Image (cartoon, rainbow, N blue to C red):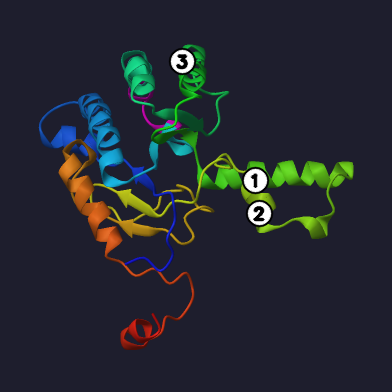
Amino acid sequence: MHFRETRTFHVGIIMDGNGRWAEARGLNRVAGHARGARRVTEIVDACPGLGVTHLTIFAFSTENWRRPLVEVEALMRIFRQYIRKKIDDLEAHEVRVRFIGLRDRVPARLRQLMQDLEDRTAHCEGLNLTIAIDYGGRDEITRAVRSLARDVASGALQPGAISERGIAAALDTRELPDPDLIIRTSGEFRVSNFLLWQSTYAEYDFPTVAWPDFTAERFAESVSGYTRRLRRFGQVLPPAGMARASR
C-alpha cells in the first residue's frame, strides 16, 4: 500500500552496464550502447500498462565526456539515429519528450534533432519521457543557485524569500513531479549524480542485470516491488491494527 496516493508515477532509470555487457560477449562497447538504445523502446512501451506516467532516463552524464572520443562520438551517433527512427512513433503514441541537462556541448546536428523532437511531441498527453543528456545533478543545482543569485543581485528576489519551492522551480525538472522510484541496472549501488535534489524521498532498486538485459518483465518486477513498499516520508505510522481500527 502507499502512504500517499498520487496521480503521477515517476520512474527514473540509470541505464548502466552497456559497455560491460558487450565486453562480456566479446563485442566492442559501442555494440552494447546500440543494444541498450533498443531496450529503451521496450521500456517506454511498457510504461502505460504499468501505470507509469513519467519516465526519466539517464542517457549521458556530464562526466561521460571523459570517455574515449570514439565512444563519445558513437553515443552521439546512436542518439541521432534513435531520434530520427522514433520521432514518428513517439508522437503517434502520445509520448511527450523533454531533454534535461546542458546543450552547448552537444553536437549541433543532435541539438537540432532534440529540439525538433521536443517541438513535435509538445502536444502529446500520454507518457512523459525525459532524457538526460550532458546532465549532472550537482551541475543542475549549481545552475539553479546561480539563477537565484542573479535574481537576488538584481533586486528581484530577497535572500529570505529563497525557498525549497523556488529552488525546485529553477531546476531542469521544474515541469516534472519528483521521482517515486529510481532504478539502476548492472548491480552497482551508486546514484551517480542523477536527480540529486529530486530523489530525496525516492525508493531505489538495484537489479543485477545490465541494461541491455533489462526486459519489460524485469521492469514490471521493479514497479511491483515498489508498490509493496510502505512510504512514510519521514513520519511515523500507527501500528497496523490501529490503522485498520481508525478506518
Which residue reaches farthest front?
247
Q: From this viewpoint, is residue 245 visible?
A: yes
Q: Are marks 1 and 2 in contact (CB under 8 Å)?
A: yes
The quarter of the picture where the C terminus appears is bottom left
Q: Main secondary structure of the magenta part?
A: helix
- Give the x, y percent position of residue 223: 27, 53
Q: From this viewpoint, is residue 77 visible?
A: no
Left or right, residue 49 beside residue 242: left
Q: Earlier in the sequence, mark 1 or mark 3?
A: 3
- Give the x, y percent position of residue 72: 38, 24
Instruction: Give the alpha-carbon distance from disc 1 to disc 3, as whole Å.
Output: 26 Å
Crowd class of label 1 (few under 14; some 14 to 19; many from 20; radius 10 Å): some
Q: Earlier in the sequence, mark 2 or mark 3?
A: 3
Disc ID at residue 169: 1
Crowd class of label 2 (few under 14; some 14 to 19; many from 20; radius 10 Å): few
Magenta residues span 65-72
- Give the x, y percent position of residue 106: 50, 22
Instruction: Give the alpha-carbon distance from disc 1 to disc 2, as whole Å.
Output: 6 Å
| Residue 133 found in image quarter | top left
1 or 3: mark nearer the eye: 1
Crowd class of label 3 (few under 14; some 14 to 19; many from 20; radius 10 Å): some
Disc ID at residue 113: 3
> Could you tell me which residue is drawn at 45 percent across and 81 percent down?
236
2 or 3: mark nearer the eye: 2
Q: Nearer the viewer, residue 32 or 155?
A: 155
Mark 2 — residue?
165
